[in-house]
Image: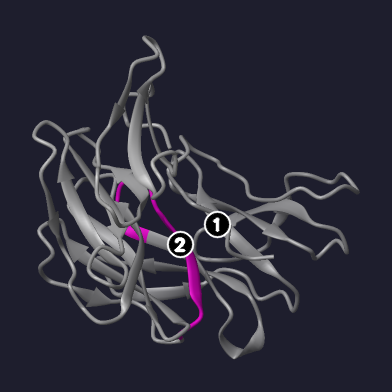
């Protein structure tokens, strides 16, 4: 993913026999290795000020979430539980980190402060994936296959209200926010082939953004910070 400066790219590589994290300055071509552990460090996500990186690592025997100081290279675990904590994502306002907890295959959405405190569970269905922060950092969109159907949902952290954004009987997945935070783009097969649609973040009529008979999916409607790869 690009950092908030739109020139620093952070990524993972297994060039050393395990997976480590690296950064690349797009303008200068300078590459820097930022983790160096025998375990795997994956799914990095920049803080809005570029000073910190949150990522997941299995260095303690299961997936935990770590925070790394970019200047010093020091990292600290934010979670230490027996479950797998995965796909961390820093809120655009810099205040919280969202992540998924995988407990024996059941995945749910959680949010915590950037110091690992005040952990809040958002979903309880065990089938939540593909979380995406709104631009201002107070709302989250995600997909859930609760009740046997894959749909898009959103959650307002200020009010504690969850919205079912789509109710199509088929597959709706991979939400991403527009720059103003009013609409969500998502992937759906409601046209009998896969296309990109848009909808108001609390739900309502959804409109086509693509209509090609080929497969169109995994949209990114703002600077790419979201990981939309778990769906269909």
* Residue that mark 1 sits on: 175
Q: Residues within 10 Å of mark 2 (few under 14, many from 20)?
A: many
Q: Indicate which disc, 1 or 2, sits on the residue closer to the N terminus.
A: 2
Quarter of the image holding residue 205? Answer: bottom right
- Relative vertical location of residue 13 with respect to residue 126 in this rendering, above or below: above
- Horizontal side, residue 103 vs residue 228: left or right: left
Mark sitting on residue 141: 2
Q: Which residues are magenta?
A: 126-139
Residue at the (29%, 26%) spot, across then down: 32
- Horizontal side, residue 133 vs residue 127: left or right: left
Q: Position of residue 75 (x, y in %)?
A: 13, 49
Residue at the (48%, 49%) spot, across then down: 182
- Horizontal side, residue 59 vs residue 145: left or right: left
- Horizontal side, residue 219 vs residue 137: left or right: right
Q: Is residue 46 magenta?
A: no
Q: Is residue 135 visible?
A: no
Quarter of the image holding residue 7? Answer: top left
Q: Residue furthest front?
A: 17
Residue at the (87%, 47%) spot, across then down: 214
The one nearer the camera, 134 or 201, is 134
Q: Is residue 133 magenta?
A: yes
Q: Are marks 1 and 2 in contact (CB under 8 Å)?
A: yes
Q: Position of residue 135 (x, y in %)?
A: 37, 45
Q: Residues within 10 Å of mark 1 (few under 14, many from 20)?
A: many
User: In which quadrant will I find the C terminus?
Assistant: bottom right
Mark sitting on residue 229: none
Q: Position of residue 94 (x, y in %)?
A: 20, 46
**At numbered mark 2, what does the secondary structure look like: helix, strand or loop?**
strand
Quarter of the image holding residue 145? Answer: bottom right
Q: Is residue 91 visible?
A: yes
Q: Position of residue 68 (x, y in %)?
A: 17, 45
User: In which quadrant will I find the N terminus?
Assistant: top left
């Amino acid at each position: 993913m690009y950092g908030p400066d739109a020139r620093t790219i952070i990524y993972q590589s297994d060039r050393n026999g395990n997976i480590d994290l690296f950064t690349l300055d797009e303008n200068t071509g300078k590459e820097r290795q930022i983790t160096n552990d025998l375990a795997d460090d994956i799914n990095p996500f920049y803080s809005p000020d570029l000073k910190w990186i949150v990522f997941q690592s299995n260095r303690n025997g299961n997936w935990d979430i770590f925070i790394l100081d970019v200047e010093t290279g020091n990292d600290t675990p934010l979670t230490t539980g027996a479950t797998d904590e995965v796909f961390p994502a820093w809120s655009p306002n810099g205040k919280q980190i969202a992540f998924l907890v995988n407990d024996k295959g059941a995945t749910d959405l959680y949010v915590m402060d950037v110091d690992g405190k005040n952990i809040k569970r958002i979903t309880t269905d065990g089938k939540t994936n593909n979380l995406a922060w709104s631009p201002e950092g107070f709302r989250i969109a995600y997909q859930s296959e609760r009740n046997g159907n894959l749909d898009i949902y959103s959650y307002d952290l200020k009010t504690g209200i969850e919205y079912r954004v789509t109710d199509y009987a088929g597959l709706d997945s991979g939400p991403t926010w527009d720059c103003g935070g009013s609409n969500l783009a998502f992937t759906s097969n409601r046209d009998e082939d896969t296309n990109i649609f848009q909808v108001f973040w609390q739900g309502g009529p959804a409109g086509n953004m693509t209509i090609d008979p080929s497969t169109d999916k995994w949209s990114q409607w703002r600077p790419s910070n979201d990981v939309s790869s778990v769906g269909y």
